[in-house]
Amino acid sequence: MQNKVIDLKIPTSWNQCTAAQIRFLCRLIAAGLNPWYMRQKVFMQFGCLKAINHRYLDDNGTPYYLFKHLPTKQFCYISLPDYSFYLRQIDWTQRESELSEQLFPSIKVLGMIKLYGPSKKIFNLTYGEFVHAESCFNRYVHTKKAEALIDLCALLYRPGSGISPLSDEYKGDRRKDFNEYTYTRHRWMIKLLPAWFVVYAFLYYTGSREAMYAAHQHLKESVSIGEDRSSDLDKHRRLVNSLNQGDITKNQLIWQTPVWDAFAMIDRMIEQHKQITRK
């Protein structure tokens, strides 16, 4: 009987993962596992494999380990060099997140209260909302304090506005309008969510912001974190105020603009400003 070929469909990047795979990965990260052990767990889960306590050595002394492929119920041997190769294929799980696909657009707190998140690549965040998210994000990156991560998740995932997507008043966002003074009031809801989901929110925001900054290099250079460690909110305010020459009306307009549109506009303004100063 001819042996069947087992196709191990293992994702090679963050955005190739399914929701179930990302959930599993976030659970491992939340558990704080050893990176090498975590890679092995990810490989087994993503490859749908079960390790069998058996191995053999070929004529060259190369060890082969027995696995069972759960979807097909087929058994296979994987050599140690091939096993190491597969683990290197998922090294992306140990690098900075590039996840920008929104795999969990909503989640229920205790199975009752529904919180809604932003769309793919945070398209529907306003520029002002994004700047406050950046403040929470960098506060967590620099301090590792859980409160900053909770605030970021509370900003991204908020209760519904009550407006149906079928309504003429619907503007493409199920969440309540962002209010910088009140968005932390539902922190208690975020604290009731499983730890893996808070990790997911951080990974999703990290990948989305990187995708946006990569598309707008001039802006990225102007607001990157420097040695002064000044707040992101202050840096963005100073940048917008400088480009608009202190025009409060224009500043407010940009602050309420969808972040990708605002980035494109500010990026062009910075590029034009650089061209003028070179002359």
Image (tube, rainbow, N blue to C red):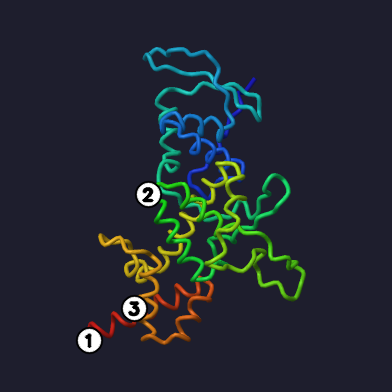
Side of 224 relative to 37 (left or right): left
Three-letter amino acid code at disc 3?
A: Glu
Where is residue 255? Give x, y as percent. 49, 76
Q: Which residue is mark 1?
A: 279
Which element type, helix, strand or loop, lies under badge 1?
A: loop
Assign the N terminus to one quadrant of the image.
top right
Q: Residue at x 32, y 67 (%)?
A: 221
- Sequence-wise, the earlier of marks 2 and 1 is 2
Three-letter amino acid code at disc 2?
A: Thr
8 or 28: which is nearer to us?
28
Q: Which residue is mark 3?
A: 271
Q: Which label sits on residue 215?
A: none
Side of 229 relative to 27 (left or right): left
Is 189 located above or below residue 278 in the figure?
A: above
133 or 104: which is nearer to us?
133
Question: Quarter-wise, where is residue 179 in the image?
Answer: bottom right
Marks 1 and 3, how far apart at CA: 13 Å
Marks 2 and 3, how far apart at CA: 33 Å
Question: Quarter-wise, where is residue 247 in the image?
Answer: bottom left
Dot in front, 2 or 1:
2
Q: Residue at x 54, y 72 (%)?
A: 258
Where is residue 250? Give x, y as percent. 46, 85
Three-letter amino acid code at disc 1?
A: Lys
Side of 40 relative to 175 (left or right): left
Is 7 located above or below residue 159 in the figure?
A: above
Assign the C terminus to one quadrant of the image.
bottom left
Q: Which residue is mark 2?
A: 143
